[in-house]
Image (cartoon, rainbow, N blue to C red):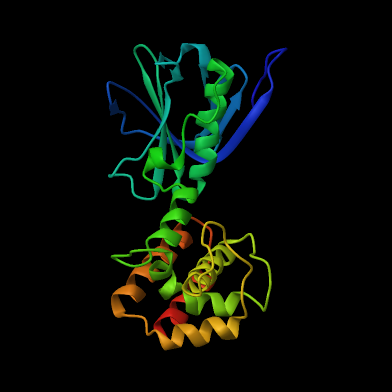
Amino acid sequence: MVRLGDDEVVLLQAEDVVFRSGSRGVFDTSAHSGSLTLTNEKIIFSYSVGLIKKTEETIEIDLEDIKIFEGVLQLKPTVRKEKVGYVSLVAYLNNKEYEFDFLQKHKKKMLLFANEANKVVTGVRDCWSVEDIGGKSISKTLRGAIGTAAPVISDLADAAKPLAPIAGAVIGSKAKVATGATGILGAVASAAMSKNDGAPTSALPDVTASEEINRRSSESPVSLDEQIEAIQKLKELCDAGILTDEEFLTKKKQIMGL
């Protein structure tokens, strides 16, 4: 439960957040687990104390008390090596620092807190991304997956060779490219095969029959290095949440011919 002012509204809430306070980068060893609330005026951390008779405690931080550096609110997402499985949100005030630890699986929620608070104070949105906490941009991951499938490539056709077996499992005859990750990978393989026939590669063409793709891929055996590289790129898509673990394992087996 949090108490709100007359013009105050709740923007975001998160559970299972661990709170610590400190100064100059040194935080107290004592910690509390509770819920974090962001309003249009402040950050509120609520937690229970006591084993038998529990009481509710709250810590409130006015957004206007958090420092601003180069136009960015210093409510900063970060990753600490010593905190495996957690990502941290640190609020920097003049003489105090507050750290809120989120579970790794809730890192997107943590980024929402940082970006929403920054928008409230400075009017600027999307200042922070997964790259700021050691993650990878999904768009860059996709570009990397379709552009560097082989260690050394000279054009799109070479890059797509190890992806051709994947395309055969996910696309149909004369079908348009799907919007998901598998559709993108399949389209790259199809585009590469069309290039060998003299078709332009400036835009991805209609997908050809899966039987044809499989036939052509079998005529050009995939090297071990190409298989490894393709699997690594698929793993990046899996880590980014584009592919499920099951889809990754299925395509891995297809690449390895298992």
Camera-side residue of 31 and 151:
151
Q: Is residue 161 left or right of residue 47?
A: left
Camera-side residue of 170 and 235:
170
Taking the spot 39% from the left edge, 50% from the top edge, the residue there is: 85
Taking the spot 51% from the left edge, 11% from the top edge, the residue there is: 64
**Residue 86 vertical position relative to residue 75 in the rendered view, above or below:** below
Residue 43 seen in the current view: no
Look at the image and tell me in which quarter the C terminus lies: bottom left
Q: Position of residue 171 (x, y in %)?
A: 62, 75
Look at the image and tell me in which quarter the N terminus lies: top right
Residue 116 seen in the current view: yes
Residue furthest out toward the front: 198
Q: Is residue 122 left or right of residue 222?
A: right
Q: Position of residue 86 (x, y in %)?
A: 40, 45
**Residue 13 vertical position relative to residue 83 in the rendered view, above or below:** above
Q: Is residue 85 left or right of residue 193?
A: left
Q: Position of residue 51 (x, y in %)?
A: 50, 39
Taking the spot 41% from the left edge, 56% from the top edge, the residue there is: 144
Residue furthest out toward the right: 6
**Residue 36 vertical position relative to residue 240 in the rendered view, above or below:** above
> Residue 134 falls in which quadrant of the image?
top left
